[in-house]
């Protein structure tokens, strides 16, 4: 065997492995695609009602990249709310991403700040659930795998929003088709599949019950957006304190 041949073979194997992880990440995103399409279409239809063009709606999807945030932004734009109020509201709605990013951060300790910024920037509720399941299953998360997962969801969301604007004139009421509940239904399915076999039923039930009660009480006496943050903290604390 020639000595110069070894590095080439090693490089070829490395490239194949890199391609495998990226493609696998794309494949693992497929179960979430239909939910993204449904809500993306609904978001595009709502954006159309606000007077946004296709490119403006797609630009908002690329920049904000958040279903709930974009629905809120579109609704507030429609009601002529001031820009600072829109920004402030979106900030609180997206505050939960701080906890999601912190949850998966231990898998990327060796990454540079720039790499982790890119991963965290594209993390959504759905990709977080898929990534958490991957971490529980394999005890690690590959950088290229999560990149494939995140980019697939990102592109799909932007395109779905654009298509939603185009067909917005033909579907005046997206709620009548149940499109506003599509992502919630998909997220529930992903959550159930991710905890199945990984979390004890008793512990899972306690976390769900406590988080739900805290969310309901907070939503009544404070606000829904802040209630989501408080219930997330409560659920995380219960998960640490309660034994299997």
Image (tube, grey):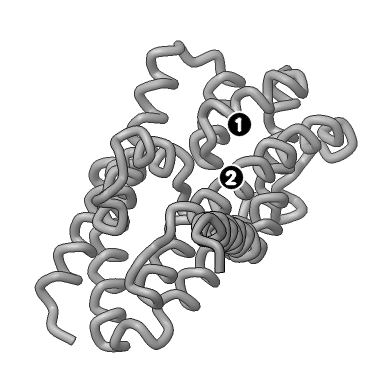
Earlier sequence position, callout 2 versus callout 1: 1
In this rendering, position of residue 23 left or right of residue 132: right
Where's residue 213, x and y in %?
26, 65
Which quadrant is home to the N terminus? bottom right
Image location (x, y in percent) of residue 76 = 53, 23
Residue 153 pos. (x, y %)? 61, 48
Mark 1 burial class by Cα count in 10 Å: few <14, some 14-19, many 20+:
many
Q: Residue furthest front?
A: 2
The numbered disc on residue 33 is none
**Residue 185 placement (x, y as % from top left):** 58, 64
Using residue 152 as the reference point, say whether residue 169 is left or right of it. Answer: right
Taking depth in this image into account, of 222 and 86 the one nearest to the observer is: 86
- Above or below, comparing residue 182 to residue 50 in the picture: below
Which residue was labeled with disc 1? Answer: 61
**Residue lying at 68% horizontally and 45% vertically, measured from the top left:** 156
Which secondary structure, mark 1? helix
| Quadrant position of residue 151 | top right
Between 121 and 163, the residue placed more toward the observer is 121
The residue sitting at 21% across, 62% down in the picture is 236
The residue nearer to you, when weighing 237 against 32, is 32
Q: The residue tagged with tag 2: helix, strand or loop? A: helix
Could you say which is closer to the camera, residue 166 or residue 104? 104
Of the 4 image quadrants, the one containing the C terminus is: bottom left
Is 233 situated above or below 52?
A: below
Q: Which residue is mark 2?
A: 151
Q: Residue at x 66, y 62 (%)?
A: 30
């Amino acid at each position: 065997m020639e000595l110069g041949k070894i590095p080439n073979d090693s490089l070829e194997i490395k490239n194949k492995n890199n391609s495998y992880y990226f493609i696998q990440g794309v494949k693992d995103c497929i179960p979430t695609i239909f939910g993204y399409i449904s809500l993306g279409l609904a978001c595009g239809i709502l954006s159309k009602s606000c007077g946004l063009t296709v490119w403006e709606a797609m630009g908002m999807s690329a920049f904000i990249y958040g279903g709930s945030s974009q629905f809120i932004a579109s609704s507030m734009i429609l009601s002529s709310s001031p820009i600072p109020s829109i920004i402030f509201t979106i900030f609180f709605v997206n505050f939960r991403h701080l906890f999601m990013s912190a949850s998966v951060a231990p898998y990327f300790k060796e990454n540079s700040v720039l790499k982790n910024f890119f991963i965290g920037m594209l993390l959504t509720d759905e990709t977080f659930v898929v990534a958490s399941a991957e971490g529980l299953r394999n005890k690690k998360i590959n950088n290229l795998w999560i990149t494939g997962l995140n980019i697939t969801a990102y592109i799909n969301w932007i395109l779905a929003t654009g298509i939603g604007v185009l067909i917005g004139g033909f579907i005046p009421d997206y709620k009548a088709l149940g499109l506003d509940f599509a992502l919630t239904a998909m997220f529930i399915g992903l959550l159930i599949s991710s905890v199945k076999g990984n979390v004890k039923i008793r512990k899972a039930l306690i976390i769900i019950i406590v988080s739900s009660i805290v969310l309901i009480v907070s939503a009544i006496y404070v606000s829904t957006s802040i209630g989501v943050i408080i219930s997330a903290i409560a659920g995380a604390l219960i998960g640490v304190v309660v034994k299997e």
